[in-house]
Image (cartoon, rainbow, N blue to C red):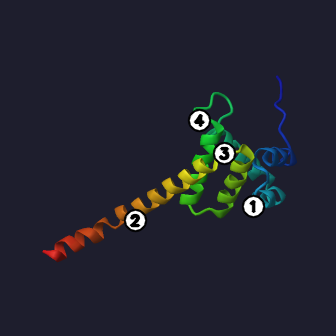
Amino acid sequence: MESKQVPTVEQIFAGMRKNMGAVPTAVEKLGRVSPDLVYEHMRSRAYAMPDQTPALDEETRTLIYMAAALAGSSPACVRAMADKARVQGIAPGKIMETIKIVRFAMATRIIGDAEPIFAMLETSAT
C-alpha cells in the first residue's frame, strides 16, 4: 500500500505565495499555533474547489470568493482575493463588475429585510 506524501505547512504556504502572492496573516499565525487546522482548512478548500474536473475556472472561483468575502465583511479574505486577482491578472472591469453585483445584492437584501417595515407603513397609510 502506497502512502500519500503530506506537504509540510511551509510547503502549503509556498503554494499560497505562488498562487495568491502572499499567505494571509491569520493563516500564517494559524500555522504556528495549530498546523492541524491548516491541513483541515486546505482539505476544505479542496472540497470546495477541486483540482480534478472543476466545474468553474480559476478566475470565476476567485471572483465568487471575492464576492462572498465582500458580502460577509471579511477584510482578510477580501485582501487575499485582491492579491490572488492581481496574481491571476483578472481584468479590472471584471473585478469592478463583481463589486457592483455584491453592492446590488447587499442593497437588495436591505429591501427584502425591510419588508415588515413596508407592511407596517402600508397599513399606517390607510
Precedes in sequence: disc 2 or disc 4: 4
Using a 10 Å C-alpha cutoff, classify the residue at mark 1 as few (fewer than 14 neighbours), some (14 to 19) or many (20 or more). few
Indicate which label's residue lies in the foreground, 3 or 1.
Answer: 3
Indicate which label's residue lies in the foreground, 1 or 4.
Answer: 4
Using a 10 Å C-alpha cutoff, classify the residue at mark 4 as few (fewer than 14 neighbours), some (14 to 19) or many (20 or more). few
Q: What x and y, as percent, mark residue 1?
A: 82, 22
Quadrant location, the C terminus: bottom left
Up the image or down, 118 lies above or below 98; here it is below
| Horizontal arrangement in the rendering, residue 33 relative to residue 55 (left or right) | right
The front one of 47 and 78 is: 78
The residue tagged 1 is 26
Q: Quadrant of residue 23?
A: bottom right
Precedes in sequence: disc 2 or disc 1: 1
Indicate which label's residue lies in the foreground, 4 or 3.
Answer: 3
Q: Give the residue drawn at x 63%, y 50%.
A: 92
Amino acid tagged 1? Ala
Kind of element beneath mark 2: helix
Q: Quadrant of residue 105?
A: bottom left
Amino acid tagged 3? Ile
**What is the number of the mark on residue 94?**
none
Amino acid tagged 4? Leu
Up the image or down, 52 lies above or below 91; here it is above
The residue tagged 4 is 56
The span from disc 4 to disc 3 (Cα, nearest Å) is 15 Å
